[in-house]
Image (cartoon, grey):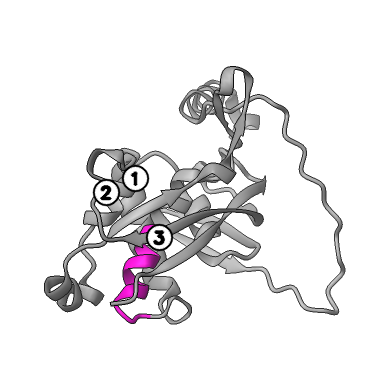
Amino acid sequence: MQLTKLSVPGKVMLSGEYAVLYGAVSVLAPVTRCIELTEINTPLGEAYTPVVKTAIHHPIREILDYEQANGLPHIEVDSSQFFYQGENDRNIKLGLGCSAAEAVGVISLRFDRAGKRIAGYRDAILGHALQAHSQAQSGLGSGADVAACAYGRPISFRTTGNDFRLDVIEISQTSPQIPMNLIWTGQPADTRKMVGQFQNWVDYGGTKAR
């Protein structure tokens, strides 16, 4: 059996970060740094991150028969492009959606090895990746970063109650081209801390904040 290998791009959120948690529209675009996933023959066990481990064991009904016959995959994940090597060789996250890309990558690999080509199952892959990511992250986040990694194209994303609306932003050869440079500040963002600060601002900022 041929082993599966694929890559998933990271994302950058151009607008709506944190506000997307309260129903605002966010706009995201893929970046050229990718996470690389390779199916291997030897299990890695405890080497998996919580998101990768959850995504590997997440039940997928569309490929249930295949995985009952062939088992779950063993996966090697290379996320080095999502980190910067700082002082004392310390890896610092660049904020490109590493955990989102992990969830999308593992679910995509499972579909692909079962003969379900990713292009034809994008919506299903996104749905399962959202569930796995949310479970591993204790429900934190809107899912916008997972959607951006799953589609690998510019999107707008908005939560609507318990659901979401996702629109792929079509870019053709005749579309206006917007040159863009992304500059990293050198400071990693503590997502949980910053979500808490934003929540506090919404709760106590009055009508203008909302």
Considering only vertical position in the picture, is 17 above or below 32?
above
Is-magenta flag for residue 31? Answer: no
- Which labelled disc corresponds to residue 150? none
Q: Amino acid at mark 1?
A: Val
Apparent side of residue 186 relative to residue 139 in the rendered image (left or right): right
- Residue that extends furthest to the top in the rendered view of this protein: 88
Apparent side of residue 109 relative to residue 142 in the rendered image (left or right): left
Residue behind mark 2: 54
- Residue that extends furthest to the left in the rendered view of this protein: 68
Q: CA distance from mark 3 to mark 1?
A: 16 Å
Query: Reading the chain from its start, which is encountered first: label 2 or label 3?
Result: 3
Q: Amino acid at mark 3?
A: Thr
Considering only vertical position in the picture, is 184 above or below 3?
above
Considering only vertical position in the picture, is 79 above or below 94?
below
Q: Amino acid at mark 2?
A: Thr
Q: Position of residue 42 (x, y in %)?
A: 25, 54
Q: CA distance from mark 2 to mark 1?
A: 5 Å
Residue 151 visible in the snapshot: yes
Residue behind mark 3: 38
Considering only vertical position in the picture, is 44 above or below 186?
below
Query: Reading the chain from its start, which is encountered first: label 3 or label 1?
Result: 3
Q: CA distance from mark 2 to mark 3?
A: 17 Å
- Quadrant (top left/top right/bottom left/bottom right) for the C terminus: top right
The quarter of the picture where residue 202 lies is top right
Q: Position of residue 184 (x, y in %)?
A: 72, 34
Which residues make up the magenta segment?
106-116
- Which labelled disc corresponds to residue 51? 1
Q: Position of residue 111 (x, y in %)?
A: 33, 72
Residue 143 visible in the snapshot: no
